[in-house]
Image: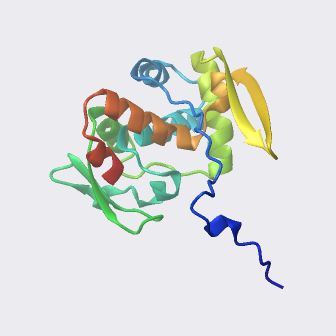
Amino acid sequence: GLHSNLIYKMRSFKKPVEDAENIYLTEEELQRIKMTILPNRHLDNVRDLFLLACYTGVRSQDYNKLNKDSLINCGTMLKVRTEKTDEEVVIPLHPIAKNILDKYNGTPRLISNQKFNAYIKEVCRIVGLTEMISLTRTCGGKKITTRKSKAEFVSSHTARRSFATNAYKAGVPSLAIMAI
């Protein structure tokens, strides 16, 4: 039942590639999120988890590994064995990340990824990330452009992209960012 089409093995065969269009939040936007007083505790918790990821680069599936035992070097670094790559990563703690971990005694309150993504959009709307942006994706061979407010595009993975982009802009070596 296997096909006999072997064109993909030819040197001239090129896989279609598309540059990914993704958003990230600037340092100024992260500061706005940090400074905004939110109306309830669950939004405050989601904001803290999001900022923690923005300043550490930790994936959402690794949030559950953040606890007192993951703090090393007198609480100045975070040591995490990642779920995806099963590698141990040591991350210098940004003062904002350290304050968040201290606030929760080293262990932030976790929620499901689905609720997290819904709540972080709400946080971003409250903060005022309402500029309209367009993202284009290819779906079924057709280009589809979606235009929404920036808040509607924010998700748990935006934190990781924000970490990488802001670290790169701050002069952190690319290899160090990739290791995290």
Vertical comparison of 79 with 135: above or below: below
Residue 146 figure quarter: top right
Q: Is residue 180 visible?
A: no
Q: Residue 52's spot in the image, x, y percent?
A: 41, 40
Vertical comparison of 129 with 144: above or below: above
- Nearest the viewer among 172 and 89 is 172
Vertical comparison of 173 with 148: above or below: below
Name the residue at 20% across, 45% down. 76
- Nearest the viewer among 109 and 145 is 145
- Nearest the viewer among 5 and 104 is 5
Give left or right: position of 125 versus 177.
Answer: right
Name the residue at 29% across, 61% down. 69
Give left or right: position of 70 versus 45.
Answer: left
Give left or right: position of 170 versus 44.
Answer: left
Q: How many marks?
A: 0
Residue 92 figure quarter: top left
Q: Quadrant of the N terminus?
A: bottom right
Q: Residue 25's spot in the image, x, y percent?
A: 49, 26
Name the residue at 40% across, 23% down. 27
